[in-house]
Amino acid sequence: MDLLNTLVDKGLRRETPTREEALAVLATSDDDVLDVVAAAGKVRRHWFGRRVKLNYLVNLKSGLCPEDCSYCSQRLGSKAGILKYTWLKPGEASEAAAAGLAGGAKRVCLVASGRGPTDRDVDRVSETIRTIKEQNEGVEVCACLGLLSAGQAERLREAGADAYNHNLNTSEGTYADITTTHTYADRVDTVQKAHAAGLSACSGLIAGMGESDEDLVDVVFALRELDPDSVPVNFLIPFEGTPLAKEWHLTPQRCLRILAMVRFVCPDVEVRIAGGREVHLRTMQPLALHLANSIFLGDYLTSEGQAGKADLEMIADAGFEVEGADQVTLPEHRVGGGCGSHEGAVSGGCGAHDGADSGGCGVHSEAESGGCGAQASAGSGGCGSHEGGGVCGSAAVAQAAEPRTDLVAVRRRGAGTDLAPNA
């Protein structure tokens, strides 16, 4: 297929596809999905080999969010039966992080629901970051706390944070359809603040909220312009009790096409499969490893994920290897620009051919909107997850044949409970 050959050539040269080419990837048929995966897989292997980076979420404060992100189980007015608790103590957070690190994770993502942190919250999280760093040599820490005020990103970096996650989630044109309590511009501003402070920027999207192909391409091209080091791709977890509970638009094949499109547009960044992979990719998760080079280990923010042991077996069976703590995630040309990440900073943008400088956590866990990029079921204002999902746009894709509501499970263990985590 000429389209795929062209996209592979551009990806290997870090050149930007056209919008038409990106849309054409999403428009390919299910009959061609293996060809699409094989092509994007060449780009992924060129920049990242067969390494898979493992990330682990710690939900520092769950639920009770004042933001109204439609996709989020922690949103204002949510009826979802999620865990609700206030801030974990630094020791409790470090203990939770240790479980993920023991399972092979090299990055810990600290997420808290809410619009954004107060200065006191930043002090609290800073203490938590220092505790985790003191007890776990070489660990990367990403904070995901919502919208940042002036000076807060700098304080987090001084405390030892390596990265900051804040997802764009959907296109600028449809953002007001999913959230009214803050704006798309607010989110862009926070990503820029993180990057300016020397933190490695992590920002991604949520797919499956009813958006059109054009919306998906818009948000991915906007992310490329912001040039984060990592781009988490969340797939909406339609939680009962949220406005998007009935939005079941994704098939495994569509998820693979979305991941391939992201890889072609951002060939040399850390593309992370975040919340919702177990619900929507299901038995085709191993194929997605040919597109993304990063995943979350175990459970998400408010939803259950695949068992950590099963994640490790899947990676090995698919012929990939877990990235070690001593290995640098990003390609050499993106390392060293002063972004303060464990692997160094970036300098050649989200696959930008000109190497523009710019500033990964993110999971959708149902994550919230603002935060760690996980969809697990995060919260709206700044948690960065997709769980919720929001009605986003025109020309929605066809409804998936059978909604798999049986795969949507609320997290009942790990942080905020007395039960061992699923790491």
Image (cartoon, rainbow, N blue to C red):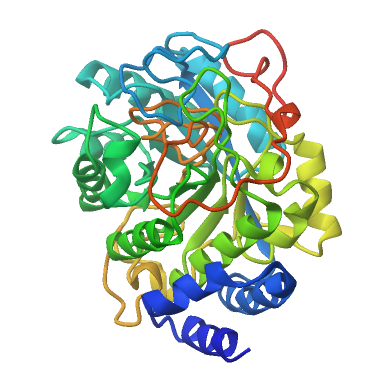
- Residue 236 or 194: which is nearer the viewer? 236
Establish if 59 lies above or below 235: above
Image check: 316 left or right of 1?
A: right
Where residue 209 sits: x, y (%)?
48, 42
Where residue 343 sits: x, y (%)?
46, 58
Image check: 342 left or right of 57?
A: left
Q: Looking at the figure, which quarter contains the C terminus?
A: top right
Where residue 39 sits: x, y (%)?
64, 79
Establish if 386 lies above or below 115: below
Say whether residue 104 is visible.
no
- Residue 213 or 44: which is nearer the viewer? 213
- Residue 139 or 111: which is nearer the viewer? 111
- Residue 188 or 393: which is nearer the viewer? 393
Q: Residue at x 65, y 55 (%)?
A: 324
Establish if 272 lies above or below 176: below
Q: Looking at the figure, which quarter contains the N terminus?
A: bottom right
Q: Residue at x 38, y 79 (%)?
A: 18
The outermost residue toward the left is 150
Picture quadrant where residue 155 is located: top left
Say whether residue 8 is visible.
yes
Q: Residue at x 55, y 60 (%)?
A: 258
Where residue 284 sits: x, y (%)?
77, 55
Picture quadrant where residue 20 is located: bottom left
Establish if 113 lies above or below 372: above
Q: Residue at x 57, y 67 (%)?
A: 260
Numbered disc total: 0
